[in-house]
Amino acid sequence: MLAVGALSVLTDRLMSDASETVKHSCAVTLGYLTYKKTAARVLFSDCRNTPGLYDQIITQIGPAAMISSDFITDYECARKVGLPCMRYCNFTILFATIFVILESIISAQCWPSLIRLLLAASQH
């Protein structure tokens, strides 16, 4: 199911304005997929990147949920710890790298290097 992109179709339908029956069916299918490690990792990532997706799954899946307790525990732990959204991780790493470079340039009083760096960045 992952190879053909079914997971993204299911999450898109779940977050759309589809009927409650479609949303429930998508949530149940996603719940079953949490028992597969690869699917659970992809869904975990999607839940971190799509605000409200996890809550929508839990809401739509109903009381007789078939969803991995490990998945729920892992996601709730990540939410409690406050892990950042994964789409911003690369940006954070890039920002931290630029900050360290700029800090070293400024602390070394290398203003010409800073100006060259900013000019080069503005051309791209």
Image (cartoon, rainbow, N blue to C red):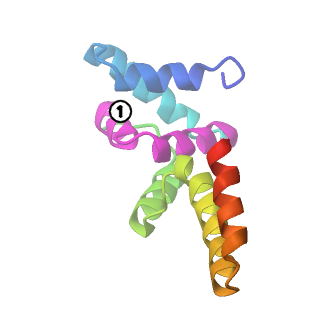
Residue 53 part of the magenta-drawn span: yes
Write the start and end of the magenta stretch as one range.
37-62
Q: Is residue 40 above or below residue 102?
A: above
Q: Position of residue 117 (x, y in %)?
A: 69, 60
Which residue is labeled 1 in the image? 61
Indicate the quadrant where residue 91 lies: bottom right
Q: Between residue 30 and residue 101, name the one nearer to us.
A: 101
Q: Is residue 29 above or below residue 37?
A: above
Considering the image in quadrants, where does the C terminus appear?
top right
Residue 76 part of the magenta-drawn span: no
Residue at figure coordinates x 26%, y 18% from the top left:
20
Q: Between residue 77 and residue 50, name the one nearer to us.
A: 50
For label 1, the crowd category at 10 Å Cα-Cα, with few meaning under 14, some 14 to 19 and many 20 or more, is many
Residue at figure coordinates x 65%, y 86% from the top left:
107
Q: Main secondary structure of the magenta part?
A: helix
Q: Is residue 102 above or below residue 4?
A: below
Name the residue type under label 1: Ile
Indicate the quadrant where residue 123 lies: top right
Indicate the quadrant where residue 65 lies: top left
Residue at figure coordinates x 44%, y 22% from the top left:
12
Q: Position of residue 87 (x, y in %)?
A: 55, 46
Q: Position of residue 82 (x, y in %)?
A: 43, 65
From the viewer's perspective, is 40 left or right of 4? left
Name the element at disc 1: helix
Considering the image in quadrants, where does the N terminus appear?
top right
